[in-house]
Image (spheres, helix red, strand yellow):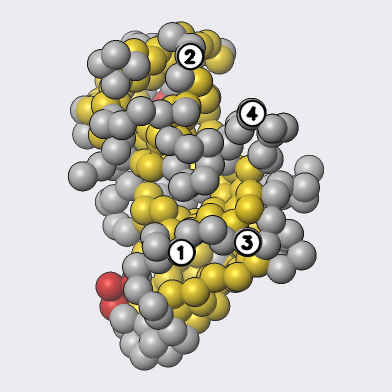
Amino acid sequence: SQQGEEDPQALSIQEGENATMNCSYKTSINNLQWYRQNSGRGLVHLILIRSNEREKHSGRLRVTLDTSKKSSSLLITASRAADTASYFCATDVRGGADGLTFGKGTHLIIQP
Amino acid sequence: GAGVSQSPSNKVTEKGKDVELRCDPISGHTALYWYRQSLGQGLEFLIYFQGNSAPDKSGLPSDRFSAERTGESVSTLTIQRTQQEDSAVYLCASSLRGALGENYNEQFFGPGTRLTVL
């Protein structure tokens, strides 16, 4: 089964609204990362949160991590049409030795 | 600076042929990763290189898949006797491993190679 599983699978909101995506995982992790993918190609790294961190901000992005619940959330505030993409969480279990384990992603659509 | 590059960007081949996919990581990145993404799916980890060494090849889908890396730079992923189920986007990523005890592993991805096996 997937280590990282995002929900919802798809999300459609109006421009300007906030978008929240969740991720759950199963095993202990070194860190958790969120990536964005446009049009099924290039992934762009958004933010990395370490296992000893609880919250992290980067511009309009806010990521939380709850290791007791093995879950993370990604909040995009004041969404824009350009935020339309697929968002993946990825867990890093051994600091890179096994690669990252990705979920199937949340497809976010921002309606203008 | 230059990011991760991959070639070719698209490859169409006939079932049974061999293909070779190339990845040029970011200069100075010691870690290199290959992933596969099938239509509508997340990414499946294939193999990881630290320098020129791949400690664990168990993520490769079958013995038709092999990978190598030379000079701590370019890596090639070879698929022999391709099958239709090999059709996917193959993504390469590189990362800068930190000092002892600090593994950043923020991965920078290339644009991928879309492989279609007819």
Q: At x 65% / y 57%, what residue is drawn?
A: B5
Describe the element under mark 3 as helix, strand or loop: loop
| Residues packed near mark 4 inside 10 Å, few (<14), some (14 to 19) or many (20 plus) | few
| Structural distance between the alpha carbons of marks 2 and 1 | 30 Å
Percent coordinates x, y for residue B7 in the rendering: 60, 68
| Structural distance between the alpha carbons of marks 4 and 3 | 20 Å
Where B82 sits versus B4, above or below? below
| Residues packed near mark 1 inside 10 Å, few (<14), some (14 to 19) or many (20 plus) | some
Location of the C terminus of chain A (image quadrant): top left
Q: Is residue B27 visible?
A: yes
Q: Chain of mark 3?
A: B
Residue at image mark 3: B53
Disc number for residue B57: 1
Where A15 sits versus A30, above or below? above
Q: At x 39% / y 87%, what residue is drawn?
A: B81
Residue furthest to the bottom in view is: B16
Where B14 sits versus B26, above or below? below
Describe the element under mark 2 as helix, strand or loop: loop
Q: Quadrant of residue B96?
A: top right
Q: Are marks 1 and 3 in contact (CB under 8 Å)?
A: no
Q: At x 41% / y 29%, what residue is drawn?
A: A29
Q: Is residue B92 visible?
A: no
Residue at image mark 2: A52
| Structural distance between the alpha carbons of marks 1 and 3 | 10 Å
- Do marks 1 and 3 both belong to one polypeptide chain? yes
In the depicted view, which residue is nearer to us: A105 or B67?
A: B67
In the depicted view, which residue is nearer to us: B61 or B41?
A: B61
Residue at image mark 4: B102
Q: Chain of mark 1?
A: B
Q: Chain of mark 2?
A: A
Amino acid at the residue labelled 2? Asn
| Residues packed near mark 2 inside 10 Å, few (<14), some (14 to 19) or many (20 plus) | few
